[in-house]
Image (tube, rainbow, N blue to C red):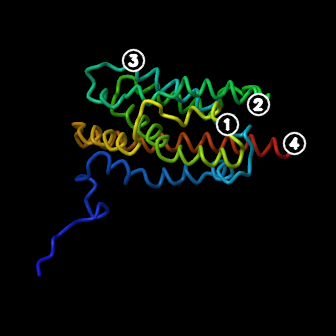
Amino acid sequence: MSRTSTRNAADIPMDELPVSGLLRSATSKAHESAETANFIGKLMRGQLSIEAWQLMLEQLDYVYRALETTANEMRDGDQCAELLYTELDRADSIEHDLRALRVRTGVDPIGMLASTREYVDRILSCRNDGVRYVAHHYTRYLGDLSGGQVMRVKFKEHYGLQDDEATFFRFEHIDSGPRFKKRYREHLDALDLDQAGRERIVEEANASFMCNQRIFEELDEIVTAQQRAA
């Protein structure tokens, strides 16, 4: 009886992986570190408050405005331009949610954190490098379409997040998250990247996850200090 020879993705050399597979594999450790940060863990377990989510969303407001400002400035001729779907834009939704949350909590903005400034500056530095920019685009928006949906459910369960406070999590112009992510990855895989380009996109994606982790660490310090002072 014959056996068909197949290879698992883990067995494929990194230089043979498509871009989407390369990013998934080469950023797994940084992704896990950000995903398991103390602040996020406590927030997802219901150990913080809706005010803690508001603080995080305020920082994301700066991040997404940088992402979307940069996307709008990229040239149409850039090979990465096809990935810049306007259906993914989150800045207006974040602004809406922050207004609704502030009415509920009465908590004033704290302004841009140092870690957020570092992240924003890194994104803005990619204006003339579509490959580096797409690394940030990939880590944020595909995360919103995946883990972000779990966050919405958890926040509704733990903190009573209302529909008018959760438009950030709703992609009204995307009919199917899985189909959209498949198409996005197909565009990623179609990018014509040489070895230097592949290394650049991986380096920037790892930097993006690290920037997110530093924001979570700074938020954790703020929330911990607030809890001690209460």
Q: Position of residue 178 (x, y in %)?
A: 38, 45
Q: How many marks?
A: 4
> Which mark sits nearer the N-terminus, 1 or 3?
3
Judge the density around disc 3: few (<14), some (14-19), many (≥20) Cα neighbours within 10 Å.
Answer: few
Tags 4 and 1 touching, CB below 8 Å: no
Q: Position of residue 195 (x, y in %)?
A: 24, 43
Q: Is residue 103 above or below residue 204?
A: above
- Residue that extends furthest to the right in the rendered view of this protein: 230
The Cα–Cα distance between marks 2 and 3, rounded to whole angstroms, is: 36 Å
Query: Which residue is labeled 4 in the image?
Result: 229
- Pair 2/3: label in front: 2
Q: Is residue 133 above or below residue 43?
A: above
Query: Which residue is labeled 2 in the image?
Result: 104
Front residue of this view, candidates 134 and 91: 91
The Cα–Cα distance between marks 1 and 3, rounded to whole angstroms, is: 34 Å
> Which mark sits nearer the N-terminus, 2 or 3?
3
> Which mark sits nearer the N-terminus, 4 or 1?
1
Tags 3 and 4 touching, CB below 8 Å: no
